Amino acid sequence: MKAVKYFSYEVKRLMRERPALLVIILSVLSPLAGLTLYRPASAGTMMSVYLANPALAGGAVSGILFGALTLYELDRTKRKRMEALTDAACPPTDTALIRTAALLPIAAAALMLTMLVWLPVSFFKIGSVMDLTNYCLAYLLFMGLALPSAILAASAAYQFTRRADLSFVLFAAFAGSSLTVWADDWQLCWLNPCVWALSDDFSNFRIFRSVAYMRLTWLTGLAGIWTLSWICVRRRGKGIIGSALYSCRRLYRPAAALLLLVCYGIGYAAQPIVDHSDPDPEVMTFAELPYLDGIVCSGRTAQVCPDTSDGTVDGKAVYMFSNSSGREQTAAFGINPGYTVYSAKANGEDAAFSVGGHQEFNEAMLEVAVPAEGDVELVVEYGGFPQESSGFSTHQGYTEISEKYICLQNAALAPRLLNVLPDEGGYPAEIEITLPEHMTVIPFCASEAERISANDGMAVWRYEDSGTGGILYAGDYICQNIEAGGIDIQFYYGRKHREVMETAGASEAVKTVVDYCTEHYGPLSFGSGGSLKLIQSRVYGGGYAGGGASLLDEEDFTSDNLNGSGKGAAPGEVMIHELVHQWWGLANMFDPSDSTDPWSAEGLTVYTAYRIVKELYGADYAEKYYTEQWRKETDDYYLNFYVREPEYLDRLPEDKRAEITGALSHVRQYCEMPLKILKAEKLVGGEEAMDGILSELFSREPDPAYPYLTYQNFLDACGLKEEDLELG
């Protein structure tokens, strides 16, 4: 009871101390750094810019502040030479425990006050896609749990060393390691979690789970280290070893430290979030497996049941084999490393199976014995929490499973057959998926999903596909049917994004772009059977296309992006720009190896958007809002100090050099290159001649070894040399 009373006194004292009040005030202001100086979330979604970055910056800055406050307060009695008196009133171990624990309510108060202050700011900046659940989770996980971690780390350093200066150096090194050398390791960056994006339109539970796991793992480890340091608190005039031996007479103390450290080690080693795929992209042993002799697959089915509350999947996959070899052989499948195979049965009998430890490209190898029977029905039951690829551990969130969004790709959907050839009919597949009633299922292929039943708030969807894998999207979608370019387009976007899409005139922009580009350049090669799905995905970092479907990254359609003047004068024009990427960027790829190269998908996309706007609103409008802006930006580029004196750019710190280089590259791609294409248009004989050239480039047969559209391809098609397009 005495300890509780002392704890209450210590909390009240801290709340009156100026250093503690200053730290609270600075913690409330710390999210400002996420809007200006420290922006680790690189995506352009509203949640990333105005929620993730402020919360992450708040965690890093306030964590360092509370670490410094901890050292200041723990050293107070020693600094004022009052240790003898305090040790006489209360045992040193009790004092150390009370002082460290008293800092936690102060940290909680700072967090609550920060959340209250920044809530209206976030609502104002994020707009209609603001979500209170995301807000609370972001601040609690990104900022809130950083504070007790910092307090424990700083307190442990002081209790080991008993010197404020040395403790501060140790804590600074520990925090600095998280911000620098550990920043790209999602398990080690204890102060600044690896969060590259938060979705506006869909859920973020996958990344929240990852951060929560990392935070709780570190809290367990730091609690173990703190307990070990607590054992070493000096008492009875003894040194660190003597004090530790004295404290260890109560066995629960070292036992607690050992238990916490063991739990940390197990949690770190056995994390279920990210796989252990071979980091070498050249290793492709799964793709090099020889096909089985005398066994073919005539079809497959899968029944998939995602649990949207805990992010797991349960499924049953059935494969139809014909075995003419007369002997038992082993079929190999790629399966998500997070899944457990519950059973495998061949024609109703248990079949031997094993899952190997080697992993490649987010797959582990499942091997199942196929008996020496003519026709074999192989049934595999599996399930678990799908792990993400270790190669993208700092960009987690793709494999989202929630009530608002689901993405299951290839081996995460069902085991992917590796070493069995198809019969004459290919690999026909029938997929059934059970989801909450409000969700829409969108297979990333030409076929449409059909809702076949509904019961107790759940619905069963079925669709047909082909191949050994497949990609499935599902979510709270709105679908708009649009006829354009001679095809039927199903345009799917998130329900939360409805207001933004309507403001931007999304359906009109789709029709305008598809009609124009189809007429001038040709139809998209990935349209199938006169139809095309345009699917807005959760923030992905780019788009891709396949037979009958194309992915649109939600990052391209945020409020900030649609109001960005660099891609158009109005939201509808920015929407046009992003949709033109279906022709220049997806249907025709550009070499991504050099992001500073002025020749990219953006040049032709900006030029095409200019031509569309010119046709819609007239030459004067296009001149005012496009070509005049290009010339102004390009003229400023050539006057830039670092362009005229590039040797000074090389002397800058790497982060500043990258920032300046990125800004200059943006001007070259979005302004200088469209001006060069416009100059080429005049040299080749006008718009009609340029349309013919671009149509030939669009419909060319790419080289499989290097499928990219190059600047030299463009120059050759125009009959020009590079110096012909220099801007005078």
Image (cartoon, rainbow, N blue to C red):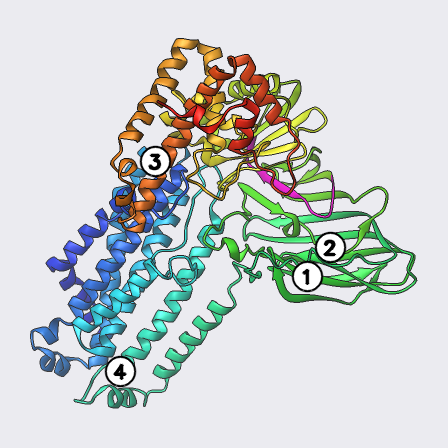
Q: Is residue 721 magenta?
A: no
* Disc 1 from disc 2: Cα separation: 9 Å
Quadrant where the C terminus is found in the figure: top left
Select label 2 or label 3 by which is in front.
Answer: 3
In the drawing, does residue 658 fall left or right of residue 413? Answer: left
Which residue carries the number 2 mark?
Answer: 418
The part of the chain drawn in magenta is 465-478
Q: Tell me if residue 505 can be seen.
A: no
> Of residues 358 and 479, which is closer to you in this image?
358
User: Disc 4 or 2, which lies upstream in sequence?
Assistant: 4
Q: What residue type is labelled 4?
A: Cys
Q: Which amino acid does label 3 sit on?
A: Leu
Residue at x 26%, y 62% (from the top left corner): 104
Contact, CB < 8 Å: mark 1 with mark 3? no
Contact, CB < 8 Å: mark 1 with mark 2? yes
Quadrant where the N terminus is found in the figure: bottom left
Q: Tell me if residue 413 can be seen.
A: yes
Q: Which amino acid does label 1 sit on?
A: Met
Which residue carries the number 3 mark?
Answer: 664
Which residue carries the number 4 mark?
Answer: 232
User: Disc 4 or 3, which lies upstream in sequence?
Assistant: 4
Contact, CB < 8 Å: mark 1 with mark 4? no
Label 4: element kind: loop
On screen, 55 above or below 550?
below
Query: Residue 365 shows which numbered tag?
Result: 1
Label 2: element kind: loop
Residue 151 x/y as whole percent: 27, 65
Residue at x 17%, y 75% (from the top left corner): 163
Mark 3, Cα crowd under 10 Å, few <14 / some 14-19 / many 20+, is many
Mostly what secondary structure, the magenta segment? strand
